[in-house]
């Protein structure tokens, strides 16, 4: 009797709740088991304690970033393939420096995750047939619903859940951003703006993405005054985004 092959086991290191949820759903639908880590240090600890077939590592995380975590993992002699997640292209030099086998650009699509899994895990895709994409009439200067639905694999139920999480997380992240600016911690403010930017790009929330990008750049430049001046615009864009969503559900 032929032995049953165990499902490939994946470790996903990603600090964004929204990005983790999306990736977990896609990976599970490809008949893989998935474990998650919320920062680089946790990823290193889990990779050291467990056997994985693949590690997907976000480059920008608290505690220890993805590059640092990957270097520490390689120091232990672990040869598991590690794929970097980044908003910017990972250079060949960075792959060598950090011990990455491959990379994916954020926001990551279902197709791109499936490509990586097929290269390193050879899984089979199951379930969740896409629903048809429809235009619910949202203001596309605020929210590209068709783009977000495509990112959700064409499944409107998945998109609804993603939007719920996005709104909840973004509200908290904006509060955190303001708090960090009040305490003059530009490094934490930059991290908060980066998180808002990344999740807004994934959800095609155009205006929030644009303003949070400007805040992140201002924080990088050490311009706290400009950051503060942009927060009301960010809050306004977020309010308009929520109103736009609510208007489509009436």
Image (cartoon, grey):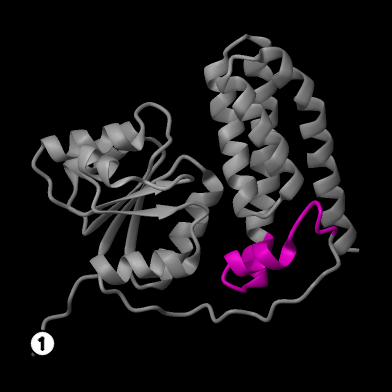
Question: Is 142 placed above or below 192 here?
Answer: below
**In the rendered picture of this protein, how many numbered marks are placed on residues?**
1
In magenta segment, residue 207: no
Q: What element carries label 1?
A: loop
Identified at 49% across, 51% down, the residue is 106
Q: Is residue 52 left or right of residue 25?
A: left
Identified at 70% across, 41% down, the residue is 210
The residue identified by callout 1 is 2
Please state which of residues 99 and 118 is positioned toward the viewer in this rendering.
99
Q: Position of residue 236 (x, y in %)?
A: 84, 35
**Image quarter for residue 235?**
top right
Q: Residues within 10 Å of mark 1 (few under 14, many from 20)?
A: few
**Image quarter for residue 220?**
top right
Question: Is 129 placed above or below 63 here?
Answer: below
Question: Is 178 placed above or below 57 here?
Answer: above
* Residue bounds of the magenta highlight: 139-160
Q: Where is residue 202 in the image (x, y as percent from the top left)?
A: 60, 53
């Amino acid at each position: 009797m032929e032995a049953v092959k165990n499902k490939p086991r994946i470790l996903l290191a990603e600090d964004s709740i929204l990005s983790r949820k999306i990736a977990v759903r896609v990976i599970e639908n490809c008949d893989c088991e998935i474990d998650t880590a919320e920062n680089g240090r946790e990823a290193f600890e889990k990779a050291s304690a467990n056997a994985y077939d693949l590690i997907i590592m976000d480059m920008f995380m608290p505690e220890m970033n993805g590059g640092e975590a990957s270097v520490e993992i390689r120091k232990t002699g672990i040869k598991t393939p590690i794929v970097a997640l980044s908003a910017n292209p990972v250079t060949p030099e960075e792959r060598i420096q950090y011990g990455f086998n491959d990379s994916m650009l954020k926001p990551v699509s279902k197709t791109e995750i499936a490509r990586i899994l097929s290269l390193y895990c050879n899984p089979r895709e199951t379930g969740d047939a896409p629903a048809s994409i429809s235009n619910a009439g949202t203001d596309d200067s605020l929210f590209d619903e068709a783009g977000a639905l495509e990112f959700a694999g064409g499944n409107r139920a998945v998109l609804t859940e993603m939007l719920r999480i996005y709104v909840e997380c973004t509200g908290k992240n904006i509060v955190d951003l303001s708090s960090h600016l009040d305490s003059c911690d530009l490094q934490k403010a930059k991290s908060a703006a980066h998180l808002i930017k990344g999740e807004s790009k994934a959800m095609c929330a155009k205006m929030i993405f644009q303003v949070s990008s400007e805040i992140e750049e201002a924080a990088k430049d050490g311009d706290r005054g400009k950051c503060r001046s942009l927060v009301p615009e960010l809050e306004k864009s977020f309010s308009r985004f929520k109103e736009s969503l609510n208007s489509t559900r009436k």
